[in-house]
Amino acid sequence: MNTQYESVIGLEVHVQLKTKSKIFCACSAAFGCEANENTCPVCLGLPGSLPVLNEKVLELAIKVGLALNCRISERIKFDRKNYFYPDLPKAYQISQYDMPVASKGFLVVEIKGDGGVLTEKRIGITRAHLEEDAGKLLHEGIKDGSWVDYNRAGVPLLEIVSEPDLRTPEEAFQYLVSLKAILQYLEVSDCNMEEGSLRCDANVSIRSIGETKLGTKVEIKNMNSFRAVQKALAYEVKRQTKAVESGEKIIQETRLWNESKSETFSMRSKEQAHDYRYFPEPDLVPFSVASEKIETIKKSLPELPKARWDRFKTRYGLSDYDAYVLTSDKILGDYFEACIQEKADPKLTSNWIQSELLALLNAGKIAIGDSPVKAKDLAGLIRLIGNNTVSGKIAKEILPMMFETRKSAETIVKEKGLVQVTDLKVLEEAADRVIRANAKSVSDLKAGKKQALGFLVGQVMKETKGKANPKLINEILTQKLPIQ
Amino acid sequence: MELFRLTIKQAQEVVRKTPKQAGELLQALTKRIGQVDSKLKAYVRFNPNHIQLPKRSDQNAPLLGIPISVKDNMVTQDWETTCGSKILKGFVPPYDATVIKKLKEAGATIFGKCNMDEFAFGSSCETSCFGPTRNPWNVDCVPGGSSGGSAAAVASDTAIAALGSDTGGSIRQPASFCGVVGLKPTYGRVSRYGLVAFGSSLDQIGPITKTVEDAAILLNVIAGHDECDSTSADIPVPDYTSFLGKNVKGLKIGLPKEYFAEGLNPQVERKVKEAITVLRDLGAGCVEVSLPYMKYAVAVYYVVAVAEASSNLGRFDGVQYGLRAENSNLRDMYFETRNQGFGAEAKRRILLGTFVLSAGYYDAYYLKGLKVRTLIKQDFDRVFEKVDLILGPTSPTPAFKVGELTSDPLAMYLSDIYTISANLAGIPAMSIPCGFSRDGVTPPLPIGLQLMAKPFEEGTIFRAASAYEQATKWYEQKPKL
């Protein structure tokens, strides 16, 4: 008999919190500066220097904790995690060990089923704790050794650890999408995996279905996109299943994902794991967070994806799925609402964004925030469709031109003479010409073959170079050629 | 009087009257160093060219034109700071410690960097990579440690005054051995920013001076809240000189019986008891008290302090600054750098600290240590409900011989038995001279008396110490060099 296996997955997400200065000093936390430009004795860990907590960091962490339905710790305490590495200037990282700022929360994740049906799944959040980022080793183009850039050292990080509640690599992907959406709505992080402002490690084990005990877990690192996380997990589940099926034991270890080879390989085993010798950071005195402060932060929380999703459905009459897609990315949702502000029809806008605009953006690998067609311009185009100035068909030709030239729809319509023909006289003359030239179809239609009408409408459209209003042509032809 | 013999108070008057004298004062000290420091090695480096002659507009600066020496674990901008360790040789900090900044703002000249036990690990000033400092009263003896260089400099009049740091007695024990005044302020009273950390929850910078008055003047300058040090207290700083010259009538002094028990040298005991009589005669009330958990202080200290030290010293890894043993392999570079750079005592403490924090041992050692530390603190809280001050010996013995305890670390650790608990409890404590031990053969050696008070009540210590000092004037006696 074949045993059926399920995978058990938990994710650790490191998010860089978007603050002006670093977590324990006044240096800029900006990305992309000259190497070691943003450093001082504190973030360089020079002898004698001492950390001082940046209050803004705590505020952002509490925000995330509340949005993830966590309990916020009454006492804020930091610990030292000791290990040696050249990117870690003090040979310890200031982190939180036994008293994370937030714990015991959950995140509701939408799992996409067959036919786009969404089902909800609640994923537990074990904890979220604050820590400082390390520097970065530079190897490229350097002979005889490496250099260290400490700009990133001391940039605030929030590590968000999920419960092992995820069951498939797809669920893990969806969890990341939902988490990122919340972080974006809170405006606490850029969530840019390429710039490293969001990083994800995954823990995965397998067990036979029905089993309640956890299997031996493997940690995988080095994934640089949500899709890579999904792929690495899928690979790892397959690898572990194959191993178990052939009677091997899974070794507790850390493995690295190799994107180009699409496989994981072992980095270190449990025996080689570090003993971090955590102990309370004596340079930072533990302190209490006033409950009023937490209340104030709670009140300041913005509308989160779930609430916006519901609002899009009730206020704009969008379908469950459309509203979900538009709200799962804050900037996309903002774009949609900006169109509505410009008096575009909500349903039309939803369709145009999801089918036409996103297709163009994806093809050009452009983020919605950088779209060459701004919301007010898309709204302009949709208004032209709504008031019959252009047909949908023509509009589909106009949008790529707008994309290309960054001109408004009105301008393009004017320049190219694309205004829809609604002049009855012009249309009737065109219809007459078509009737004369297509005797066969005309008699078919009169004989009751309704599909001939479609053909004739198409011919009139051709005659008018696509600018005719199809509804009007339909009426004219039906009037001129009554079915006998 | 020779200029090098001046106290801060006297130097203030001299420089105020004749600003030009500041330069002469510096020359006198430089000359004095040339005469006596080759025997003592109190300094690891000094700079006679640092002086900025006072300008008229600086008239309010309390240390105007006065040279102050500092222990070599306080970072000085653009001036090498080594902590007595080979691993930091050549390290030139890009910033000033807060105390250095404050001294400079007060008009002082940072005159010299004093020798110390490597990273302040020691009680004899023998573990420095620059070699041992000697006691000015008897060069065969140690000056105490770890701030031995600072204490020897002040005692030998090669410094007007100095700063030391105290993690378990490192200001008070050398002050006691060298016959000078040494104050460890309340934890949080003086900023630690720029003090190379040993035991972060215990370290405190304080003055080592010729007189109690000088200690008050210097503490006035260096005390206060610092935004760069989260552990510094945001509590107003009183004028400590206002506590001087007052009587001690009605002051209640506790004498812990544990401080006068087995292991206390008889001559030390006699001198401390004579001091008690003096204070009684001046009107203070003395009662016996008990600090039952004090017997665990040394043990707790050597868990907590070394744990913090092992972590604090991780940064000396050859990557950014200091010594690097070049190696193409990162692991070997770490091993070799730290092997060559650290001395035996530093290695011993790093190993101990790493052990007590290791998985599986943390609860048994570090966590338990923290719990006992709390009990020791509570001991003091209880006693301070009844008394204003606690009095006892600073060290169980006068200065011992160079090399006498180097092969017996435990005996060395026990020389801090009376001083460590003040660090664990975070309370202020001062050592002041209370006489000499005489055997009739070797030169007399100073003995220190320790006064401890409630947190942030340094003023009470100054009041009693000043009254006692004026009644005894031990500071008038000088070593023959």
Image (cartoon, coloured by chain):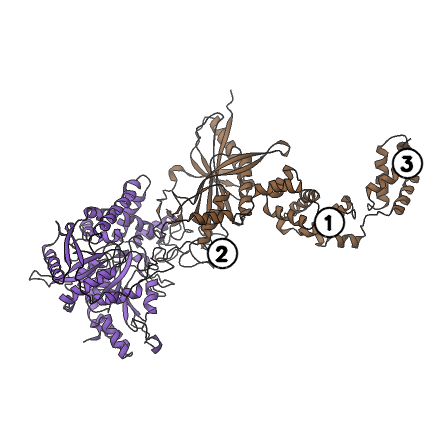
Dot 2 falls on which chain? A
Q: Is disc 1 on the same chain as disc 3?
A: yes
- Which amino acid, mark 2? Lys
Q: Which mark is residue A481?
A: 3
Display colour for chain B: purple
Instruction: Point out the tag, 3 or 1, that comes first from the N-terminus.
Output: 1
Relative to B192, B11 lies left or right? left
Q: Which chain is brown?
A: A
Q: Which of A305 and B419 is in front in this view?
A: A305
Could you say which quadrant of the image residue B221 lies in? bottom left
The location of residue A469, given as percent across then percent down, is 82, 44
Mark 2 vs mark 3, CA separation in Å: 72 Å
Residue contact at pointers 2 and 3, CB within 8 angstroms? no
Residue contact at pointers 1 and 2, CB within 8 angstroms? no
Residue B175 to residue A75: above or below: below
Mark 1 lies on residue? A381
